[in-house]
């Protein structure tokens, strides 16, 4: 039974619960009000005892009794209104050192589109599902590659960038509520075609009826057979515009390494005695640099040893001399300048976007890498190759066609997902036909 205590005109209520005594202050009230509150305390304690009422999880019994059987939630701290460009800048600044250069570039481009559609003054904390749907609907009408509308995959990546920044903002108390994407509707997606040889692609094109966009999609699936890889390396050796191009192309073809991974390689990562190279990864584990060890073929060892005999002396395995004649970045008149973000669309031209950090001495930039690859394949049968990633596809396909254990292939190539592994793990058409012949003759 609740007891009433009065001291200097101020009343307190004392009661016992779960074998312990508790009390709370009523203050300077009348005797009648104190009696009424004591009776209510007895009533609430009785309901708890009879299990007609339940103390909320995490609730304090004193607070429950004092406030007539209610738990008053604490006031949420006030969250400052944060504009979309502010979230962008702080998010990029925090992740500047932990993410791939290409990943950061993609984040900048995605935010460029987000700001372009939602506006410079858009308040992130006020984001509703309708705002995200409005963004998706507008982006779905934008022009994509090869005359198509922008794909749902691209739009999804842009929303994923905002979602990642949002989750980071919650951790840093810039935002409080969950990302409001539940129920967001995207345009229909089309599954990517399997990887194909040149012969398969050319037969499809010859059959006719394909649009320029569909033909471009076919060449995105192109991979080289082992014989074609040998022929291609011979072509590049004769056409390379810089000394580092041929050894780097050979490295990509014989290890399946990504362009960004090759640009990070250092001379000390090579172990010729152990016939291996250690490749640093930034995509396998979020926020952490991991490594994988890849075996070196006898051919690649020979090429790399020859390259090191004339190496510029930089710490990076694939590097360029300080000055290069007729170079936009490395000539004696222009000097070696760091690359900065160059927005590709009007939507990407937003202020306060962080630029790429200066390149270390001798390091090759991604743009230089792409440019010299395209120069090497220009005006040749290899002109339809989309970039360095074709050599990665070719390496994995060659391993699969020779029956190399998939676990070994994945450890060498550093795959990211089962879906990606499944798309890579295909066999040459001739190998598939030979396998089928063992069944049906």
Image (cartoon, rainbow, N blue to C red):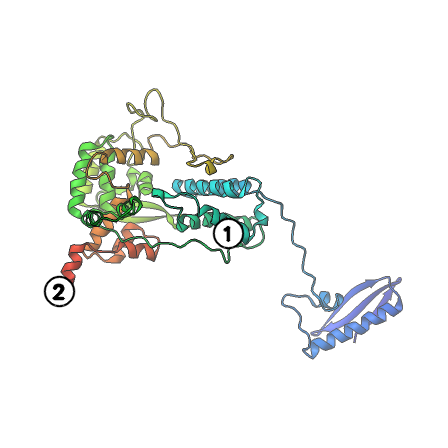
In terms of secondary structure, where does tag 1 sit?
A: helix
Q: Position of residue 175 (x, y in %)?
A: 57, 50
User: Is residue 37 found left or right of 115 in the rendered image?
Assistant: right
Q: Where is residue 97 in the image (x, y as percent from the top left)?
A: 44, 41
Task: In the rendered view, tell whether residue 9 sits above or below residue 133.
Answer: below
User: Is residue 167 found left or right of 25 in the rendered image?
Assistant: left
Q: Which residue lies furthest to the top in this view?
A: 333
User: Which of these two is toward me, 289 or 440?
Assistant: 440
In terms of secondary structure, where does tag 2 sit?
A: helix
> Which residue is labeled 1 in the image?
133
Q: Position of residue 213 (x, y in %)?
A: 31, 45
Q: Where is residue 128 in the image (x, y as percent from the top left)?
A: 56, 52
User: Is residue 254 found left or right of 179 in the rendered image?
Assistant: left
User: Which of these two is toward me, 422 or 29?
Assistant: 422
From the image, which quarter does the C terminus lie in? bottom left
User: Could you tell me if residue 174 is visible in this image?
Assistant: no
Residue at x 46%, y 50% (from the top left corner): 160
User: In this figure, what is the number of numbered marks?
Assistant: 2
Place residue 427 in its image quadrant: bottom left
Task: In the rendered view, tell whether residue 64 sits above or below residue 219.
Answer: below
Task: In the rendered view, tell whether residue 361 sits above or below residue 156.
Answer: above
Q: Disc 1 or 2, which lies upstream in sequence?
A: 1
User: In the image, which is nearer the foreground, mark 1 or mark 2?
Assistant: 1
User: Which of these two is toward me, 291 or 441?
Assistant: 441
User: Could you tell me if residue 320 is visible in this image?
Assistant: yes
* The label number, if any, that marks residue 438 in the structure image: 2
Label 1 to label 2, Cα distance in Å? 53 Å
Mark 2 residue crowding within 10 angstroms, few (<14) / some (14–19) / many (20+): few
User: Which of these two is toward me, 35 or 163?
Assistant: 163
């Amino acid at each position: 039974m609740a007891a009433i205590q009065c001291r200097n005109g101020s009343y307190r209520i004392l009661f016992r619960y779960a074998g312990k005594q508790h009390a709370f202050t009523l203050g300077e009230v009348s005797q009648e009000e104190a009696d009424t509150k004591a009776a209510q305390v007895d009533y609430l304690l009785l309901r708890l005892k009879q299990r007609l009422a339940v103390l909320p999880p995490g609730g304090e019994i004193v607070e429950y009794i004092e406030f007539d059987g209610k738990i008053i939630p604490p006031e949420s701290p006030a969250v400052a209104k944060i504009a979309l460009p502010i979230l962008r800048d702080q998010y990029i600044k925090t992740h500047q050192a932990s993410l791939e250069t290409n990943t950061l570039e993609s984040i900048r481009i995605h935010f460029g589109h987000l700001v372009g559609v939602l506006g410079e003054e858009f308040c992130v904390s006020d984001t509703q599902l309708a705002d995200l749907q409005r963004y998706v609907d507008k982006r779905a009408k934008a022009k994509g590659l090869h005359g198509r509308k922008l794909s749902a995959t691209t739009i999804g990546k842009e929303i994923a960038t905002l979602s990642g920044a949002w989750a980071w903002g919650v951790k840093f108390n810039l935002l409080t509520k969950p990302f409001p994407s539940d129920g967001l509707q995207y345009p229909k997606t089309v599954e990517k075609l399997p990887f194909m040889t040149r012969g398969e692609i050319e037969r499809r094109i010859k059959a006719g009826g394909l649009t320029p966009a569909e033909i471009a999609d076919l060449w995105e699936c192109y991979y080289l057979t082992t014989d074609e890889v040998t022929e291609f390396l011979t072509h590049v050796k004769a056409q390379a515009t810089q000394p580092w191009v041929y050894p780097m192309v050979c490295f990509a073809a014989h290890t399946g390494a990504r362009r960004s991974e090759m640009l990070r390689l250092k001379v000390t990562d090579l172990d010729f005695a152990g016939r291996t190279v250690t490749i640093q990864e930034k995509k396998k584990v979020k926020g952490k640099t991991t490594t994988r060890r890849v075996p070196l073929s006898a051919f690649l060892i020979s090429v790399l040893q020859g390259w090191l005999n004339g190496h510029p002396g930089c710490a990076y395995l694939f590097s360029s001399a300080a000055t290069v004649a007729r170079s936009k970045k490395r000539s004696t008149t222009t000097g070696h300048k760091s690359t900065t973000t160059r927005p590709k669309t009007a939507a990407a031209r937003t202020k306060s976007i962080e630029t790429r950090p200066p390149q270390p001495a001798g390091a090759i930039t991604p743009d230089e890498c792409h440019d010299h690859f395209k120069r090497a394949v220009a005006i040749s049968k290899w002109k339809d190759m989309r970039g360095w990633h074709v050599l990665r596809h070719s390496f994995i396909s060659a391993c699969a066609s020779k029956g190399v254990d998939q676990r070994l292939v994945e450890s060498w190539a550093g795959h990211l997902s089962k879906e990606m592994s499944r798309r890579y793990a295909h066999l040459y058409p001739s190998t598939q036909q030979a396998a089928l012949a063992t069944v049906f003759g």
